[in-house]
Structure formats: C-alpha cells, structure tokens
Image (cartoon, rainbow, N blue to C red):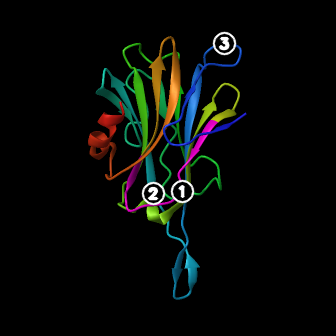
Amino acid sequence: MTVNMTKGQAISLQKNDGGSLTAVRMGLGWQAAPRRGLFGSRTREIDLDASAVLFADKQPVDVVFFRHLVSDDGSVRHTGDNLVGGVGQGGDDEAILVDLSRVPVHIDQIVFTVNSFTGQTFQEVQNAFCRLVDETNGQELARYTLAGGGPYTAQLMAKVHRTGSGWTMTALGNPANGRTFQDLMPAILPVL
C-alpha cells in the first residue's frame, strides 16, 4: 500500500514484519506543461536531472548523478539520464537505486534532488513526483507529488536517513535554484 506523502512527512523504512528494507528505488517523473501559443497548446522537452548526495555527519562524501552513475562504494546507482521527461507517462523518468544493506555505516543521510540543467523552471513542468519503491518486490511504498510549479530550477525532493538501526524517508519538496547538485549545496545543508 502506497503512502501519499506531504511536505515534511516522514515514514519508517521498516517492513511490516519487523524486518528492514534492503534495496529501494527512488523514482522521479515529470512532464512538460503545455503552453498556450498562437497556434494552440504545445509542449517543450524538459531535461531534469536526478541526483543523490551522500552525507556523513553533515559533510558530502559522494554523489550519484548523470555524470557519475555509481557511488564509489557501489551502494547507490543511477539508471541513466532522461533528456525529455514524460516518457513513462506516469512512470519513472529517472531512478536511483540504493542498496541500503551496502551503504557504509558512516553514511547517515542521502538527499535526492532534481534540477534543470538547461535552466528551465518548474513553471514549465507538470506531474512531477518522487516515489520510493521496494526494489526486491516492486511495491511502491511512498509517493510525493509536487504541487504547482514555480520560478525555481530545482527541488530538494526527499532524504533517506538513518534512525537507530533502520532508515527513514522524509519528503522535503523544497524549491531551490541551480543547474547542478553543487549549486544546491547551500539549500541542502539546512535540511540535514
């Protein structure tokens, strides 16, 4: 059963039977918003990029994005860059796989971001979402849908962080500006 999350909401990544999830997929999807023009509605391709920044004690130690598809330790993997969005018509346009059982113990938070490398704003995007899927069985666990667009070029979507012996996901939904994950670091640090 999927939990439809709201901004700031957190859910435990413990299974109902008391066990822990071992592998999850953070899927991101979006579509170009139609624009009214002289000859009717039309859309423009939107290139958003998903990234996962790995932190140890509030210090960035690794990142997974379209130019670095696998974390140095191999526990986090990006499935590849999607340059247009909306290909899955509601499915994932980009995904980042996290093998929670292999994430090194010093990594305590993973922040998932999405940004427009070409500088298009979220006013040009519709139906943007992130979702967390149990990678072992394909079951969607949580979904966070972005409400409304805005004049910003990035979003801090969610974070997965250690809590005791397990992990918790928190929906962030914080707008930001930047073309790359490096540009977003000043916006990420306050949510750690």
Q: Position of residue 75 (x, y in %)?
A: 47, 23
Check disc 3 and report the residue beneath it: 18
Q: Position of residue 64 (x, y in %)?
A: 40, 35
Rate crowding at label 1 as few (under 14), some (14 to 19) or many (20 or more) other CA atoms within 10 Å. Answer: many
Which element is circle 3 on? loop
Query: Is 115 located above or below residue 96 in the figure?
Result: below
Is 45 part of what is drawn in magenta?
no
Which residue is pictured at 35% across the width and 26% down the height? Answer: 55
Mark on residue 85?
A: 1
Indicate the quadrant where residue 4 lies.
top right
Residue behind mark 2: 47
Quadrant holding the N terminus: top right
Which residue occupies 36% across, 15% down? 106
| Marks 1 & 2, CB-CB < 8 Å contact | yes
**Is there a contact, CB below 8 Å, between mark 1 and mark 3?**
no
Dots 3, 2 in contact, CB < 8 A: no
Residue 6 lies in what quarter of the image?
A: top right
Dot 1 falls on a residue whose secondary structure is loop
**In the displayed structure, would residue 140 be above or below residue 102?**
below
Q: Amino acid at mark 2?
A: Asp
Q: Residues within 10 Å of mark 3 (few under 14, many from 20)?
A: few
Question: Callout 3, which amino acid?
Answer: Gly
Q: Nearest the camera: 30 or 171?
A: 171
Query: Does residue 165 appear left or right of residue 176 in this picture?
Result: right
Q: Nearer the viewer, residue 167 or 53?
A: 167
Highlighted range, magenta: 142-155
Tag 1: amino acid: Gly
Q: Is residue 1 left or right of residue 30?
A: right
> Of tags 1 and 3, which is closer to the observer?
3
Residue 14 vs residue 114, the one in the foreground: 14
x then y, percent, for residue 153: 37, 56
Q: Nearer the viewer, mark 3 or mark 2?
A: 3
